[in-house]
Image (cartoon, rainbow, N blue to C red):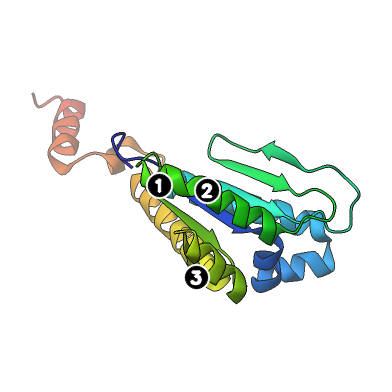
Amino acid sequence: MSPSRPPAVLIVDGYNIIGAWPCLKKTSQNVGLEAARNELIEALISYSAFTGYQTQVVFDAHFQKNCGNEEVITKQVSAFYTDFGQTADTYIEKLCASLRHKVAERLLSRVVVATSDRAQQLTVHGYGAEWISAQQLCYEVEATVCRTRKKYKSRKKPNSRFLANSIDAKSRQRLAELRMGLK
């Protein structure tokens, strides 16, 4: 992302995504909801760093009688836990409404909401936000992981421990001549 382009915001309906991604659903069932939340957040950290999104993952209070709070995970990713009785959908709708003017003023390039809740998709679209399904987000996160691996794999140095295997043929020839005392 170029410095002159305003950032984009990705809002993720956390429990909707956990319920839709098979790997997260399995983690939730086998290990617990907290482990699934952490796994989702970890996936979004890498994805957000690669794409440049300012990402906020929203979780319902989930029958906890706690006050809502925001946890800053990284510079680009935060998690918000709603107040008791407030749904993630309500919070996301209010957030989209509040960000609408920032998009109009070009302080943000766009707002994207990730959810497979059809009613939520229609509502946020009414606020000018884009949406992607849970499956589409999963695909994009996995594709980003593959691109990142490919990018860093190409930079990886040869596994050989010998210097001669990591230099060009002309340099290898010159080293051989020096070893033999020919020049």
Q: Which residue type does callout 1 highlight? A: Val
Q: Between residues 86 and 27, which one lies in front from this camera angle? A: 86
Q: Is residue 118 left or right of residue 159?
A: right
Figure quadrant of the N terminus: top left
Q: Which residue is mark 2?
A: 46
Q: Is residue 26 above or below residue 79?
A: below
Tag shown at residue 13: none
Tag shown at residue 136: 3
Is residue 54 something that shows in the picture? Answer: no
Earlier-in-chain disc, 1 versus 2 = 2
Q: Secondary structure at mark 1?
A: helix
Q: CA distance from mark 3 to mark 2?
A: 16 Å
Q: CA distance from mark 1 to mark 2?
A: 25 Å
Q: Which residue type does callout 3 highlight? A: Gln
- Residue at the location (8% across, 23% down)? 183
Q: Secondary structure at mark 3?
A: helix
Residue 103 drawn at (x, y percent): 40, 47
Q: Which residue is mark 1?
A: 103
Dot 1, how many residues are within 10 Å of its Cα: few (below 14), some (14-19), or many (20+)?
A: some
Earlier-in-chain disc, 1 versus 3 = 1
Q: Is residue 104 above or below residue 117?
A: above
Q: Is residue 20 above or below residue 11?
A: below
Residue 55 drawn at (x, y percent): 54, 47
Query: Residue at the left extreme?
Result: 183
Q: CA distance from mark 1 to mark 3?
A: 23 Å
Residue 68 drawn at (x, y percent): 78, 43
